[in-house]
Amino acid sequence: MTSSSRRKEEGPLLNGGVKQSTWSKAFNSNAVWEEKDEFLDVIYWLRQIIAIILGVIWVFCAHPVKTLIFCIINAGVLYVYFSSFQQIDEEEYGGTWELTKEGFMTSFALFLVVWIIFYTALHYD
């Protein structure tokens, strides 16, 4: 086995031989993403975290267009994350639209479930 193929199997190394985890790369600006699916998984799970947080917060908001505001915040935060913070090449992942819609419907469904559960728990007579 050559040293270059062994290095590729081990993945990106940090600090003299310690493999950098996916979540540590997710919170480091300009991280190197060896695998496309790894970055898409980060996008997916960040959307789910945003959905849970906004679902709980929206219980206390009385605004009638909650779902529209959720969609704008969810898409906007992730767009800023991958375009400004990570500064990835969107075309490598299928374009901006592909990254923006990655995991969007499942996060919207999770947002609705969390909001309904918390709203019912707080306002049920």
Image (tube, helix red, strand yellow):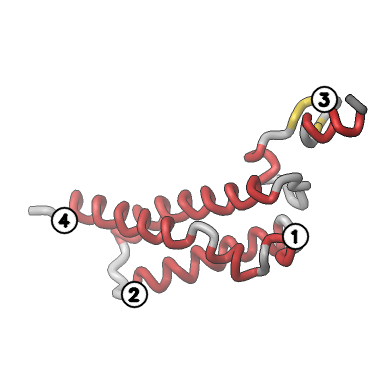
Q: Which kind of residue does numbered mark 4 sit on?
A: His
Per the image, the residue denoted by label 4 is 123
Secondary element type, mark 2: loop
Secondary element type, mark 3: loop
Per the image, the residue denoted by label 3 is 17
On the picture, is 44 further left or further right than 64? right
Alpha carbons under labels 3 and 2: distance apart: 50 Å
Contact? badges 4 and 3 (CB < 8 Å):
no
The residue depicted at 66 percent of the width and 45 percent of the height is 27
Q: Which kind of residue does numbered mark 3 sit on?
A: Gly
On the picture, is 28 further left or further right than 55? right
Closer to the N terminus: mark 2 or mark 1? 2
Mark 4: give few (<14), some (14-19) or many (20+) Cα within 10 Å: few
Closer to the N terminus: mark 3 or mark 2? 3
Secondary element type, mark 4: helix
The residue depicted at 67 percent of the width and 39 percent of the height is 24
- Check the image and report above or below for 63 versus 109: below
Q: Tell me where residue 22 sits by quadrant.
A: top right
Q: Which mark is residue 65?
A: 2
Contact? badges 3 and 1 (CB < 8 Å):
no
Q: Which kind of residue does numbered mark 2 sit on?
A: Val
On the picture, is 32 further left or further right than 56? right
Q: Nearer the viewer, residue 51 or 32?
A: 32
Q: Which mark is residue 87?
A: 1
Alpha carbons under labels 4 and 2: distance apart: 19 Å
Closer to the N terminus: mark 4 or mark 3? 3
Mark 4 or mark 3, which is nearer to you?
A: 3
